Amino acid sequence: MHAALVTSFDRPPRWTEVPDPEPGPGEVLVHVLAAGLHPRVRSGAAGTHYTSDGVLPLVPGFDGVGRTEDGRRVFFAGLEAPRGSMADLVAVPADDLVDLPEGLDDVTVAAVMNPAMSAWLALRHRAGLRPGEAVLVLGATGNAGRLAVQLARHLGAGRVVGAGRDPASLAVVRRLGADAVVPLTADDAAERLAREAADVDVVVDYVWGAPTEGALAAVTGARSDPAHLLRWVHVGATAGPTITLPAATLRKTNVQVSGSGQGSVSPVAMVSALRELAAALPQVRPQVDVVTTPLREVEAAWGATTASGTRIVLVP
């Protein structure tokens, strides 16, 4: 079969022939129809993801849409190197397959499931969002952040605030359902966060680093009731891997900081959440910009420049 193959962490994968996968016990072959090129895939192919074991070669791709030999159209995720979804075929544990409802095409599902899953896990399973609660999405201008805004609305959030570094993309975030937006690059970003998000119940944080330090100080410093629980869920670190957290913040405000990702949610719970999300997507009707690229052009796709909020999806 043909697949993308990573032979060096310093170079993009190349399209080549590799042996067909041989399913192990409990696994089935899936013919891949679409696979998203998202940050989790890039970090895995670069050997920088926290789950990477540094072993090469590997086929990149964490998830995808495919069809089983008996005709089921499925989504699958959680692939571990060296196997990946950027190939003609992949062997997947049968218990991990998620049957897809009608109403969304293969490319759209491949584009949205990974970023939407990050938001779904954070909102439902880590924060336990309840209808009527208020949500702040830090990093709302990227794929995952935009979907977090849409899913927060779907889950009944009473107020949604989107914050990000791209003012032009924030206009899109507003159209997707945010009640207010805050440009993190503005000189008065802290004042705007204090005004628009002082009393949110949940923060879904895709940025971390210095923007999180500023946002955490602004939000906790402006709360009308410091004892009201603030659930701050860290999902991504686009602005940096660390923060400085003043001890006083945890004493003067009832804030709960947790993470959401591989390891913080069990594999069984992850598959269950994927099934919940897949069933909800036809009602959510997520809006996402997609660039579809043939798998044989994976090397060029790896270096392609796309607009904020656009997802590349590789197809056979």
Image (tube, rainbow, N blue to C red):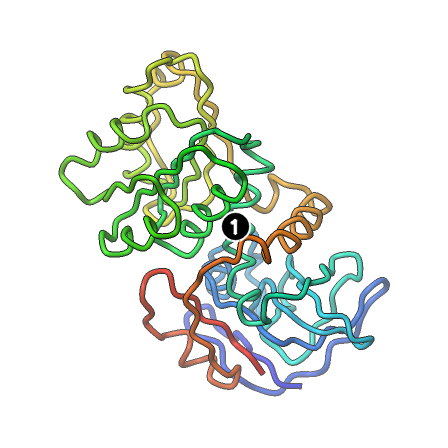
Above or below — where is 155 with respect to 286?
Answer: above
Q: Quadrant of the C terminus?
A: bottom right
Residue at the far right: name it: 25
The local secondary structure at tag 1 comes to: loop
The count of marks equals: 1
Question: Residue 269: percent from the left, percent from the top?
Answer: 70, 43
Local crowd size for mark 1, using a 10 Å CA cut-off: few (<14), some (14–19), many (≥20): few
Question: Residue 113: percent from the left, percent from the top?
Answer: 56, 58
Q: Quadrant of the N terminus?
A: bottom right
Name the quadrant containing residue 250.
Answer: top left
Query: In screen coordinates, is 228 left or right of 172?
Result: right
Q: Is residue 57 visible?
A: no
Say which residue label 1 marks.
50
Amino acid residing under circle 1: Tyr
Question: Residue 244: percent from the left, percent from the top?
Answer: 33, 30
Seen at 70% across and 66% down, the residue is 74
Name the quadrant containing residue 106.
Answer: bottom right
Query: In screen coordinates, is 136 left or right of 187?
Result: right
Seen at 57% across and 69% down, the residue is 56
Query: In screen coordinates, is 150 left or right of 74?
Result: left
Viewer-proximal residue, 15 or 294?
Answer: 294
Question: Residue 204: percent from the left, percent from the top?
Answer: 44, 39
